[in-house]
Image (cartoon, rainbow, N blue to C red):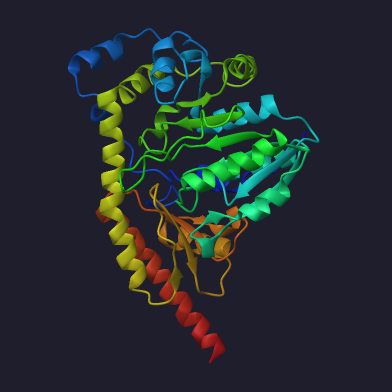
Amino acid sequence: MRLDQFEMERLQSTWENRVKFNLSESSVHPMSIRDLASDPTFHNQLLSTPLHYNQSNGTDELRDMIASLYPGATLDDVEVTNGGSEANFVTVFSMLDPGDEVVVILPNYGQIWGLTNSLGMTVKAVHLREDLAWAPDLAALDAAVTSRTKMVVVCNPNNPTGAVLSEAEMEAIISIASRVGAWILADEIYQGSERDGHTTPTFYDRYDRVIVTNGLSKAYGLPGLRIGWIVAEKELIVKMWSYHDYTTIAPGTLSDMLARVALSPAGRARCLERTRSICRQNYPILRRWMDGHGSMFRLVEPRAGAIAYVHYDLPVNSTSLIRKLLHEKSVLVVPGDHFGMDRYLRIGYGLPPEHLQQALDHIHETLESLRSLLGAQTA
């Protein structure tokens, strides 16, 4: 088996810890352990914890906390994984076979698109529409879903656009999937990062064939813990747990322990409000910067996540542009090419404000130099 290269992750894995300004990240500036848990007693407990194999599907305590976020779920309906990426991988690995038909709503995090194509599934794309504020084309979705469709994949809130489905759009997606008995895989990892403070509703418990993936990397600002999860009916979770034996086996012992702090009622409220306050503080910085460039940029305002999916009006390929920024300015952003859409950039704005402004100033310098060069060439 040969996997298609996951271009966005290859770019980020290579450069995100080498550049001076990382605007490729889709979460806010991460919390430290001290930010998360300041109690010295807990620190001593953490330092004294034996580094044994953790309960491989997540401790009962952690799974019970996760289950409490989903109507009707119990700890037996939860599988804890190493990040949301592993949650998605285990779900696809356990639920789909070569030849199965999968409908993916795009743009989306490229993992499932690349994985299902590589594993020999029949994959169909249905696109969000910018002219509808990045809402899904429901007529196109209805046409794409057939009696052969085994799974419909959606990311809500969406990566890279920051759009959030309305209740009516969620119900329409469920209706379309239920028409043929297809599973819905809902990646909800940006849930809780909404600037307006209204938590995006989950797909869970709205339809009897829903699988939800989520984790602590985005809305909680804790990507280094590598804690994700799958929520589904108990029988599926038992199956997925056995597939997890073939990947990382178990989440880290200390990560599980810290995740329980983050998902306690007080910890969860603190983490999510921190993320939302960073997004509320930083988005105007990005907006003012964009407005200062006149008509060069087009943006549908994101509602969730510290990400903006920006169209730019320059005749320059997006990968070529980001490589110029990378090598000349030590700034990393994600090119629209990685979502199959040229002349877009996904700009992460979750950095400390002064750092964000410096990075944007560097991008401005590069754009101005390109504009001058292109103007000279056409003169």
* 137 relative to 371, above or below: above
- Nearest the camera: 344 or 141? 141
Quadrant of the rendered structure where residue 97 is?
A: top right
User: Quarter holding the N terminus?
Assistant: top right
Horizontal and vertical percent position of residue 109? 56, 45
Horizontal and vertical percent position of residue 72? 46, 20
Which residue in the rendered view is the most extreme toward the bottom?
379
Specify whether residue 53 is in view: yes
Residue, x 64% and y 14% (percent of image)? 242
- Nearest the camera: 54 or 230? 230
Horizontal and vertical percent position of residue 56? 52, 13
Which residue in the rendered view is the most extreme toward the right?
99
Specify whether residue 33 is in view: no
* 255 relative to 343, above or below: above
Is residue 361 found left or right of 115 in the rendered image?
left
- Nearest the camera: 244 or 147? 147
- Nearest the camera: 330 or 188? 188
Is residue 271 found left or right of 181 in the rendered image?
left
Quadrant of the rendered structure where residue 50 is?
A: top left
Horizontal and vertical percent position of residue 265? 28, 24
Residue, x 52% and y 61% (percent of image)? 132
Residue, x 35% and y 62% (percent of image)? 360
Count every numbered label the image shows and give the total. 0
